[in-house]
Image (spheres, rainbow, N blue to C red):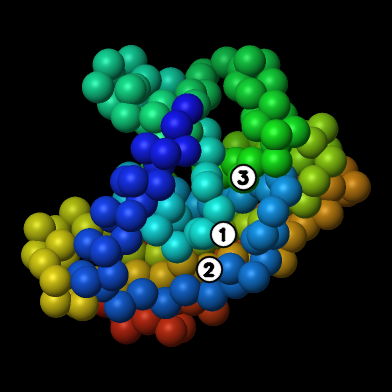
Amino acid sequence: MSDVFYRAIRFIGTHIFWASSRPVVFGLEHIPREGPCLIASNHTSPYDVALLIRHVPRLLDFVSIVEVFRNPLLGWFYGSMNAFPLDRHKPDAPTVRTILSRLRRGRVVVMFPEGGFRRGEASVVHTRKMKSGIGRIVNMANIPIVPAVVINSSVYSKPVSWLPLFRARYALAFAPPIAPDLPPEQIESRIVESIVNLYTLASGKLPEHARVL
């Protein structure tokens, strides 16, 4: 884990994204300026991570999939950016312990409770479904969780979007925190509802062609 490396990559990337985009961003005030925090976001493309890093002023620790870490180069890069792996195919107690350890150190941990990329009609925005378990982690950590939505991050899969033309359109939005003293199922239901509501609000601020999940 390297905060220095993270800051260096964010510094470089921020300028690239600034010159290439006109984003819609709101709700950052819901992320505490200090202390532990959990963020739960939808997940449509690899660029979700990059855009969260760009716009959230706190250092972010991402829960990623174990398959990424099997590639030596990607595993090194993700690990250097404070990410750590989760095995989606079995109960993963070590990852839960890592999440709780990072939070005890006052860090911000980002989770993608859909369990992988979910685009279009498969997105939680439409299915209102995600993997169970995040509510239990919120209970164990005993800290609120901030729902988030990223819209049209896949615009950066097009080479032209990287040009310094301020043309790439995407949205990033955050909802008020959900308290940890609710039953896990209720926490997860509220996360889903918050993400759906955020999508409605944020997509309304984008041109129709950019309301992509």
Query: Disc 3 marks which residue?
Result: 108
Query: In the picture shown, does residue 50 fall above or below 137?
Result: below
Quadrant (top left, top right, bottom left, bottom right) of the C terminus: bottom left
Q: CA distance from mark 3 to mark 2?
A: 16 Å
22, 139: nearer the viewer? 22
Of the residues under marks 1 and 2, which one precedes in the sequence?
Answer: 1
Q: Residue at x 32, y 29 (%)?
A: 77
Q: Separation of disc 1 and disc 2 at Cα?
A: 6 Å
Residue 90 position by quadrant: top right
Residue contact between numbered discs 1 and 2, judged by CB atoms under 8 Å:
yes
Tell whether label 2 touches label 3 (CB within 8 Å).
no
Give residue 17's position: percent from left, percent from top: 27, 64
Rendered position, 45 above or below 147: above
Which of the labelled discs sits on residue 148, or is there none? 1
Q: Amino acid at mark 1?
A: Ala
Left or right, 29 with respect to 24, comes to: right
Q: Residue at x 37, y 37 (%)?
A: 5
**SS type, badge 1:** strand
Q: How many marks?
A: 3
- Name the front one of labels 3 and 2: 3
Q: Which residue is at a point 15% across and 62% down the rendered structure image? A: 162
Sequence-wise first label, 1 or 3: 3
Q: Which mark is residue 173?
A: 2
